Image (cartoon, rainbow, N blue to C red):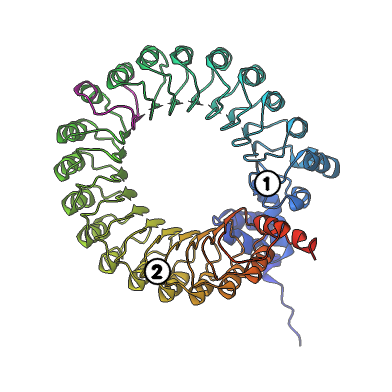
Amino acid sequence: MSTRYTPILSLLTEDLLIQVNEKLVQDSDRKKWRLICKEFHRVDSLTRKTLRVLHVEFLLTLLKNYTNLHTLDLSVCPRIEDGTISLLLHHVDHSIWARNLKCLNLSRANGLKFAGLEMLVGACKGLESVDVSYCCGFGDREAAAISGCEGLRELRMDKCLGVGDVGLAKIVVGCGRLERLSLKWCMEISDLGVELLCKKCLELKFLDVSYLKVTSESLRSIASLPKLEDLAMVGCPYVNDVGLQFLEIGCPSLQKIDVARCDCVSSSGLSSLIGGHSGLLHIDAGHCFSEVSPTIVKCIQKLKNLNTIIIDGIRVSDTIFQTISSTCNSLIEIGLSKCEGVTNMGIIKLVSGCVNLKIINLTCCRSIANAAICAIANSCRNLLCLKLESCNMITGKSLEQLGLHCLLLEVLDLTDCCGINDRGLERLYRCSRILCLKLGLCTNISDKGLFYIASSCPELQDLDLYRCQNIGDDGLAALSSGCKKLRKLNLSYCVEVTDKGSKSLGYLEELSDLELRGLDKITSVGLTALVTRCKRLIYLDLKHCEKIDDSGFQALAYYSRNLRQGGWGNQDTAMNKNECIAIFYGDTRYLNETE
């Protein structure tokens, strides 16, 4: 008597499969899921809301399969152009894939011009967010095309160098409901354009005018925005204290202000601004003036809800830290990079009151020693990010305290901390949540230290070992086994690494950014072993890897289809121009044309 078995997958309804699919957070897990069977792939197609396209030749097929998208990211398709958009709209029913589309990322799509942009905007009627940052060729005509998005709430136009006041005028007239706008590096926009913007877009909550040649007259206009919460104007050379005085009596909703590197802003002007906004949550005044004045200290005392203060490059004193400690108990982030006057006692006073600190930047505070770090570790138990670059007096004792008390730590920068060694890294064994670890120029670290990292940091995604010359193949083997989620790795000038180590890196399948500059023991054999497995490489630096020849680069061109940026030079190769293009785009069609 035979028994009939019912496949278990047939017992799972579509609703159950959708619920399972929604529980998958990691991209790698979702990819494995949809490759199991056609039904899982169909469910993934129905539920996917975000799509990042790596190759423009697959765009048509993808948009036919994924019809419920909210976000479409084309920022890594370097060859998208007007003809691509025309082909797409003629061969794929845009009434299906474009109907729910809310967010469109076209960052760095320099091949796209007015005609293509106008067609795309016309097809996607419901767009609420558009990013055209670093489309350096965009001008007023392209801005006019964007103005067709009547429901637009967010627009990023960073470094659209050709967009001027006329283009901005088109946008603000057509997109009057804008809430977030970034115009960073749009050098042709002047006070006139900002004035019109502030008259038409009264719903603005976020505005970035960093590096524009605007004057304080623009701040007079900005001060009239009733709902503005976040204003960034980094590196505006013509903005001065008069402009900040306009903001003092305007922008009633202001919560965040960034005036970093505004050379004409003084401590007096910033004091005026702070005095008019007791509800400020975030202040960034890095590299604005020489020292923190008593007036600013007095103003800070009134900011009971302040959670972020960044004063990079400004002279400070222990008294200032005492004031912050006693009045700013809600502080979450403090930036003191390259500040003069930062002492162990000052940091001890700071953290005695600011126990909620999660991000601390002490880059180049060279007087800091173990006493300060031990105080941070004991007081700030929720610390997520600690930057200690060039703090040369720190030793393994500091790491021991961090390992005992800061179990939530995600980012640790120890670049050029020459007192850090393998034993110190061992003491971080309880910090299992570290995502980013920077150890560049820590010359006392060896393979033994990498063994400790590999066994303690399974979530690690970014590791910098620049010029750690005692690192070799055995350490990389340990990394490839214990840190499977590694995406960025810098091994430049780790001169003991050979083909064996390069082969080990091939087991890091999530790797996207890899720097191997100056590794003169790696040959084409090692490079081939690496690229045959690391299919997600986007950036690869091979400068001064002098033993890699044509065969290695041909393997790179064949296997690294996602490569977008690379560095190679000083190799003795016979490659022609088309082969170099093939490597850059990861497209073997260019190679075939030369055969």
User: Secondary structure beneath disc 1?
Assistant: loop
Residue receiving disc 1 = 78
Check disc 2: other Cα within 10 Å, few if <14, some if 14-19, many if 20+: many
What distance separates the C-alpha of mark 2 from that of mark 1? 36 Å
Residue 244: image location, x then y, percent? 37, 16
Q: Quadrant of the N terminus?
A: bottom right
Pick the residue in front: 181 or 66: 181
Pick the residue in front: 384 or 116: 116
Q: Quadrant of the C terminus?
A: bottom right
Asked if residue 377 lies in the magenta stretch, the reply is no
Check disc 1: other Cα within 10 Å, few if <14, some if 14-19, many if 20+: some
Asked if residue 279 lies in the magenta stretch, the reply is yes
User: Secondary structure beneath disc 2?
Assistant: helix
Residue 144: image location, x then y, percent? 70, 23
Relative side of 402 to 60, left or right: left
Residue receiving disc 2 = 454
Relative side of 228 to 285, left or right: right
